[in-house]
Each structure stands twice: as C-alpha cells, then as structure tokens.
Amino acid sequence: MLDEDVRLMLAFRDGDDAAFDALFERWAGKLLRFLERMVRDAAVAEELVQETFLRVHRARARYAPDAKFSTWLYTIASNVARNELRRPFRRAPHLSADAERDGAPLELAAEESPVDEIVNARREGAEVEAALAQLPERQRAALWLAAVDGLPYAEVAKALETSESSVKALVHRARVALAAQLANARSKVAPASAGALARGGSR
Amino acid sequence: MTLARDAELSALLDGALSAHDATALRAEIERTPALASRLAELARVDEELRALPARPVPRDLRARLQAKLDADARVRPPLGAPRRGAPARAGRQRAWIAGFAAAAAAAIVAVIALPGRDGGTPPSERVAVSPALVAKPASENPGDSRVAADFAAVTDESEPFHAQPAPPVEIAREPLATTPKTPGEAGPARSDEIVVATAGRGAFEPEVPALEISAGPAPSLATVSGPAILVEVSDEESEALDELELGDTSVVAVLDLLNELDALEAGAS
C-alpha cells in the first residue's frame, strides 16, 4: 500500500494539481519550522519553503517513488537552506517576527544586559532557540530532523547526504552541546534574576 | 559521563539502537542513577525543542508560491517534458555543468583559503585539501535514474546527470613540527598520525564535494593529487578534525568542516 504522500505525488505527476495543494498543506508547516531553524530568518524561511515546492513542482515529471517523499522533500529543503547559508552577504538573521519587533536577533541574547536576558529567558523557547542557533548548521539540521520531525537516522542521512553513523554523531554532539548550553544559560539567568529582584525591592 | 555513553543514550532517545542494545542499556540505566539523570537531561533538550512555538504558515504563502509557479511556467516546461531543441543542446548543457563544477571547485578553494586564521592559537599542523568534481551524463548510468532525476531537479537542469565520486578529494594532514609558520618561528611538535580522506560529491549538491573521511594509508602532503590548498590549523582545530568519524566512513561537506573549525576559532578568541 502506497504512502499517502507518495500517492499524492504520483497523482500530481499524472496531472492532478489538487494533489500538489494537498502536499503543500501537509508539509509547508513542517518545512517552515525546519527552515526557520536552519536560516534563522522567518522571511527567508518562507521564501525557501516556496523554493522547495517550486523544485518539487519542476521535478514532478521525473518523480519515481523509490524513496520516501519526506526524504526527498527534506533533501531539497536542506539543499536550498545550505545554498542560502552560503550565499555571500546574507543579512543578519532574524529568527521571528517577535525578534524583529524587538530589534535584536535571539542569538545576540548572550550579549544583552542581565535585565534583557531575563526578559528573553521568559520569552517562550528563547533559551533553546538561542542555543540551537549556535550549533553548526549540520548538527542543527540532524538534531531537528531526528528529534523534532522524528525521522529515522537512515532518512536523515539521505536528506543530509551523509552516512547513518555520521548522523548518529551529529545528533549526539548537537544534543550534548544543547544540554550544556541550556544548563549554562540557566545558571547565568538565575543569579541575574535574583539580583534584579533585589534591586527592584530596594526602591 | 563519557562521550560514548552519551552517544548511546542519544541513540536510545532516537530509537536508533538495536532491540538487544536498547534492552541492555535500559537495564543499566535502571541500575545507574547517573545514567538515568543524564538520559533525562538529554531528553529535556528534545522536549524543549518540540515545545518551541510553531509559527503558523502565513495564509498568503500558497498564493505567493502560485505566483512563482505561474512565472516559472512561462519560462520553462516541467522537467522531463519534451523541449524543443533539447537533444541538440544536451551536449552543451553537459559541458556547462562540467564547467560550472570546475568553477565551483575553484570557489571552494577560495573559500577554504579565505578564512582568517591569524587569531587564536598558533597552527600546529597543515591540512591539504584537494577538491575535484566531475559531472557525468546519466545515460552512462542507466540504472540510477532517480538520483539523476533528483540531481536534475535540484540543479534546475532538464538533462539528468549522475554525480560520480571520482576523482577523489583528498585531505592529508601533516604535523608542522619541522615546518616553521613564519621564518624563524617553529610550530609546536606533533606526532599525530596522518589521515587521508577520499571523497566524491552528493547527488544533490554538485557545488559541494562531500568528503568521506576514513582511516587509511598515511600519505604525506606530497602525495595529494591535483591542486591542493594548504590550511594551517591549531591544536584545537586539529582535535576537531580528529572528531570526524575516523575509521568508520562518514561524510562531511568541506564547508561544514570549516564551519566547525571557525566555530572553534570563534570560541577560542
């Protein structure tokens, strides 16, 4: 029995445009979240989601269901992200609309004042987002695909064009680095919070 | 906690251990509080990642994509569709791809040569990287049409090409013990074994050669074939190289290697 995504892609290949819409509905959100973490820029990530689907659209006539559709899609997405990251003169990344409104990308949080740190730490997911942003591109991709999107190592390996053993190492190193960074960030924020509260209380 | 134990715990979280290994590790975790606590620490990373707020897909994203698709349809037929003049142009396109690949190889040389390595710790060894890229028509590999199709899809070419992993990219490493960095300044002695990496390139990313790092016969820098760039690396950077999956074949992109090195350099400065 055919995987639903493969069925849709085959239908699209054979001329059913509604199947392409269905694939977009099923995958645009996941791709957007993956690409946001890769390029750390919400607007660019949206462009890359479009670029990924544009390539799927262009390649439809040659699609053959000998790999999982998700693997194929993530391979294309990983490549468009990689191309973007290697583009000269990239603008400074802005992870989210919130970050843009605040006028500072999240990865600069470590250089901000203690009060800003506390505010950022309270913002949902800011710590882990900032820590993730500091990982090397490949570790970030491998960890996201394995831990968040739940792809088996074999699929991550295909999407990143590497070996399973390499994926295992990338994911492991990423997880250990994130665990350490999060522990470190919390140990810094806790005393700063206490200090800020003490200053506030003395007024 | 050793790195090896962390790696096992990480693989356990991803369901990547064999049933036998997973059962054995779970039993050990039950007996060992330190292991259980480390597993919880690593699992918390996953929980926090999964709990990150998911921004909804903008309502107009599909419409913006459609505008691009419409514009695209005006300038090109879908891949695989017969195109007027395609057979006559195939040879030229292949030649263009090969030329592009050669230019990309040159660009990679430039990128590798460019990063400033004048800060941080003094270099202790030299690394030679010799990139080479080949594009081969898919017709010579009729059994691998999917790779060719994917390659064509990603490179926007209507003619399929098959990526060939030859000739190799090589990395050779040689301690700088006898090679002064600058006249009169000898590098620290190192007795690392020299490692060579042969490489091909991925089917999807013709611009970037993938390096297959493997333990192998230890050549000197003089044995690196083809044009090579020399990069002097510090002890820390050398350790980053050591972390690549030696002995067990793995693949990294040249620029990922450099990213790792640059991250280390940034961390050290």
Image (cartoon, coloured by chain):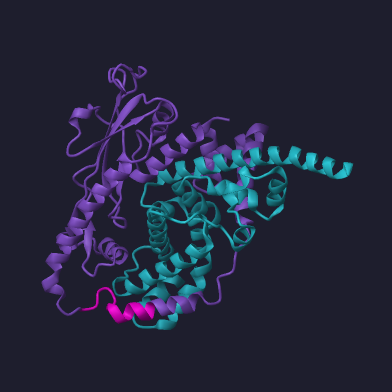
Q: Is residue B156 magenta?
A: no
**Residue A1 in view, yes or no:** no
- As displayed, is residue A10 above or below residue B35? below
- Give the magenta range: B69-82
Q: Chain A: what color? A: cyan
Q: Residue at point 39% right, 29% down?
A: B238
Q: Residue at x 48, y 37 (%)?
A: B266
- Mark count: 0
Give residue A182's position: percent from left, percent from top. 63, 42
On the question of residue A87 being in view, the answer is yes
Where is residue B96 shown, x and y percent of the image?
18, 61
**In this view of the protein, which residue sits in the foreground, B161 or B145?**
B161
Estimate the x, y position of residue B234 in percent, counting from the top left.
Answer: 39, 27
In the rendered view, would you say A143 is above or below B234?
below
Q: Colour of chain B?
A: purple
Q: Is residue B165 left or right of residue A168?
A: left
Q: Is residue A68 above or below residue B268?
A: below
Quadrant of image for the C terminus of chain A: top right
Viewer-closest of B154 and A9: B154
How far from the left and from the top, in percent, is residue B107? Answer: 27, 49
